[in-house]
Amino acid sequence: MTEPDLAVRTAEERDALLGFVEHSRGEIRQLLDDLTDEELRSRLVPSATTVLGLVKHCTFVERVWFLATLGGRPRSELGLPETVEPSFELHPADTADSVRAAFDAACAQSRQLVAGLALDDEVEHRRFGRLSVRWILLHLVREYARHAGHGDILREQLLARR
């Protein structure tokens, strides 16, 4: 994967932000690579956090910030929980392929939605008040960096067990 700063070193702000978002999405997506289903579901910390659960949560993140917040659709209409915790929960049908496909679909919907918006466009957030598209994109990079780091540590632990 190309480092985002190399890909967008001289880009305009919008292209630079979107480049970093795409890089962050790629980091999340790669967490699922080369691990067994058992490893992906392994709980190595006291919380319910697993590698598969992290990527599933990031699908929730995409849908909440883009479809619900920017798109103005109610969480209930999107089948999204009202709190964050359930977004990490795994079900028997959740696999690397199904979670990756859901994440990819959510990212595609997000890209489509953002394509029609300017960075300075604003929306009302239910907790934070007025937010710009710029802030949401920056927040996504921040959140994904944190979760990719969590996932990297979990992967390191899992791979060390082999």
Image (cartoon, rainbow, N blue to C red):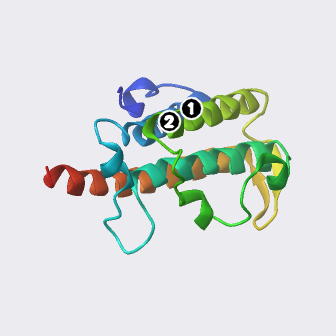
Q: CA distance from mark 2 to mark 1?
A: 6 Å
Q: Quadrant of the N terminus?
A: top left
Q: Is residue 155 left or right of residue 60?
A: left
Judge whether 78 appears above or below 105 on screen.
below
Res 12 quadrant in image: top right
Q: Is residue 42 left or right of residue 113?
A: left
* Mark 1 surroundings: few (<14), some (14-19) or many (≥20) residues within 10 A: some
| Residue that mark 1 sits on | 104
Location of residue 22 in the rendering, given as x and y in whole percent from the top left corner = 51, 33
Residue 88, numbered circle:
none
Q: Specify whether residue 145 is in view.
A: no
The residue drawn where x is 36% and y is 53% is: 151
The residue drawn where x is 80% and y is 54% is: 75
The residue drawn where x is 51% and y is 45% is: 94
Location of residue 40 in the rendering, given as x and y in whole percent from the top left corner = 36, 49
Amino acid beneath label 1: Asp
